[in-house]
């Protein structure tokens, strides 16, 4: 269950980072509210997952999900560049997340 909560926390991290970009540095009200709410939810769920998961594993997976999601959101929503190097880097982060999950003690 902690892993599921951690994944949801990571998805909320993608939401708040995307909202932060959309808020134009907290100049726009509703995107700013969205950013603050999803940031709070992300942190709350990350903290809850750390009750069971090791700090290093939980934090790294959370930031990895956020990083991959932010790159994808940037490409899709903000028309940021996509190229082989960026895709390769995303795959490296994904490999690290999978590696941490596979080496997690039962």
Image (cartoon, rainbow, N blue to C red):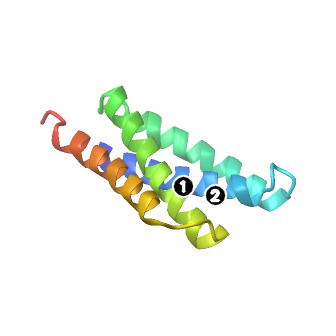
Observer-nearest of 30 and 70: 70
Q: Residues within 10 Å of mark 2 (few under 14, many from 20)?
A: many
x 30%, y 46%: residue? 97
**Residue 23's x, y, as percent?**
78, 57
Q: Secondary structure at mark 2?
A: helix
Mark 2 highlights which residue? 18
Q: Residue at x 54, y 55 (%)?
A: 14
Give the answer, above or below, for where 41 lies relative to 24: above
In this rendering, the count of numbered labels is 2
Direction from residue 27 to residue 87 in the image, left or right: left
Q: Residue 26: tell me if it is visible.
A: yes
Identify whether 62 is placed above or below 78. Answer: above
- Residue 1 visible (yes or no): no
Label 2, label 1: how far apart the Cα atoms are: 6 Å
Q: From the viewer's perspective, is residue 34 above or below residue 99?
A: below
Whether pointer 2 and pointer 1 mark residues with C-beta atoms closer than 8 Å, the reply is: yes
Label for residue 71?
Answer: none
Quadrant in the rendering for residue 96: top left
In the drawing, what numbered circle is on residue 14? 1
Q: Quadrant of residue 85?
A: bottom left
């Amino acid at each position: 269950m902690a892993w599921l909560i951690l994944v949801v926390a990571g998805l909320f991290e993608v939401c708040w980072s995307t909202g932060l970009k959309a808020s134009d540095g907290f100049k726009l009200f509703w995107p700013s509210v969205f950013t603050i709410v999803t940031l709070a939810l992300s942190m709350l769920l990350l903290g809850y997952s750390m009750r069971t998961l090791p700090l290093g594993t939980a934090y790294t997976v959370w930031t990895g999900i956020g990083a991959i999601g932010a790159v994808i959101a940037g490409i899709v929503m903000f028309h940021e560049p996509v190229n082989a190097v960026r895709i390769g880097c995303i795959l490296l982060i994904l490999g690290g997340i999978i590696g941490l999950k596979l080496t997690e003690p039962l």
